[in-house]
Amino acid sequence: MSTFASLPLAAQSPRAASDAAAAASDARSAASDAPRSARRWALPGGLTRAQTVTAAAIVGAALALAGIGLYLSFEHVAVFAHERLGFATLGKARLFTVGVDVGILVLIALDLLMAWLRRPIGWVRFPVWLLTGATLVLNAASAAPTAGAWTTVDYVAAFAHGIVPVLFIAVVEIGKTAIDRVVRQAAPAEGVPLHRWFLSPVPTFTLWRRMKLWAVGSYAAAVERDKELRVYRVMLERQHGSVRKAPSDARLPLTMARYGLSVDEALALPQEAEAREQARLEAEEDTRAAEEKRRAERTAQAEIARLRAAGDVQSARAQVSAATSRAEVEAAAAVAAAERAATADTEAHQSATAARADAERAAAEQAAAEARRRAAEADKAEAEARRDTAEAAATATEAERRAAAADAERAAAEQAAAEARRDAAEADRAEAEARRDTAEAERRVVEAEDELALSSRDRKIRRVARMILAAGGSAENLPLDAVMAAYSVSQTTASEYRTAAAEVLAHGYTPAS
């Protein structure tokens, strides 16, 4: 292979391409440096002003030739079509003649336009030739004698009627070839020389077949490629004694020659395959790294969700405990207030009773003294005693009323305390029932997961999904602390569990499924 690296085609083709690119760049710079008038008159082939004028004159002459041909043949062909070809009227025969002539002109214009645009259509010329031949025959037939044998003059007349169409087609073909050479002068088409077909027909056909199959536009390039392949075969035989003994990579140019690959292209195939394989492996590695990164992110998100859920549970427990404690404190305060009110009423009643007894004793003593001192004032003293007795009785009645109110308040406080204790008991019972329902649902989910034969990680992820549903359905509402506390895992793992659980919920998971 190192011997073959110095072959002319392999060594010179890049340099030739660079030289062609440099020449094209120089041509563009020269065109940009040319005067504006010269650029305005220049054609794509780089014609000067004089050449452009000459080309325009030739085109005008060709159009004039076409007009002359149409003028000379129109009436003859129309009359011949009406009289001999069965057209009902002369007008229809003239329309037929115009259609043939216009069809020829349209096809010729299309052929020249596609050649100018470097997109030639090779088969367009064949219908042009066919229509021109038909016009030629019709013109010659219009000059044929209606009766009797053909004379020399008749043949000359028929030939004269066909000269102008033939001349017009010749001008069109020459113009098309000229356009093709002007437009594609940088890469002229080079066919197989005629003498080679006579001197070596079979190898020449093989070479020509390769040129057509593998789009080799130059005969010299095809010969060089064939020479290159032959020299490479000889080098292989020289190095290994036989082509069959050469390594498979070294035999690639001989194997891939049937597919139109050059020696350099065939030898480059293993390196290209290795490069593609390396690119594929790198892409797989990148995909694997991205998947690991996403898995780590999901683990971290699951950990965060677990911690948040644990925090929410602890917060709820604290709120329930605070509410229960507040209710107990309020009940105890109410009981204490009722007891204090009852004690105050009792003390007031005792004070009223003692005061009444003291008043009665003082009144009796005063009455006795008054009786001893004045008998006349006994009635007054007795009246005052009765008044005092009535006032004492009213005071006792008020004390009893206050005692009854205190008893009612104590009973209401005891009832409020009983209701608070009943509410706390109902809350404890509801919490117990909720825990029992949760345990039952968890048991059913675990049984369903056992039937699905889920892995331990999948079970944990589904349990985190249920925690998310209990927290309101959003993964952000479930703290990672709750997940960490539930599974005793790190924050990263809890984040992965929460992220994976969110994805499971997004795919339609429900605790019953």
Image: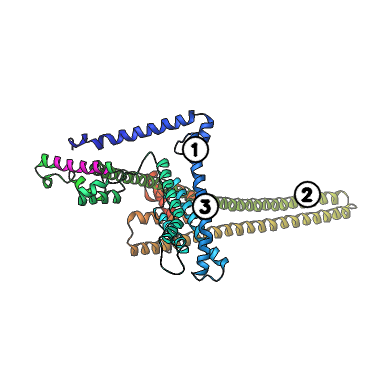
Q: Quadrant of the C terminus?
A: bottom left
Q: Residue at x 33, y 55 (%)?
A: 456
Badge 3 marks a residue whose secondary structure is helix
Residue in front for this viewpoint, 93 or 253: 93
> Can I make out residue 275 in this image?
yes
Q: Which residue is mark 1?
A: 52
- Residue 426 position in % (x across, y down): 53, 61
Q: Residue at x 53, y 59 (%)?
A: 74
Q: Residue at x 41, y 30 (%)?
A: 26
Q: Which residue is mark 2?
A: 362
Residue in front for this viewpoint, 11 or 61: 61
Residue in front for this viewpoint, 11 or 480: 11
Instruction: Bin the neighbour count of mark 1 within 10 Å (Cα to Cα): few under 14, some 14-19, many 20 and up.
Output: some
Q: Which residue is mark 3?
A: 68
Instruction: Bin the neighbour count of mark 3 within 10 Å (Cα to Cα): few under 14, some 14-19, many 20 and up.
Output: some
Disc 3 marks which amino acid? Ile
**Which stretch appears magenta?**
221-235
Q: Nearer the viewer, mark 3 or mark 2?
A: 3
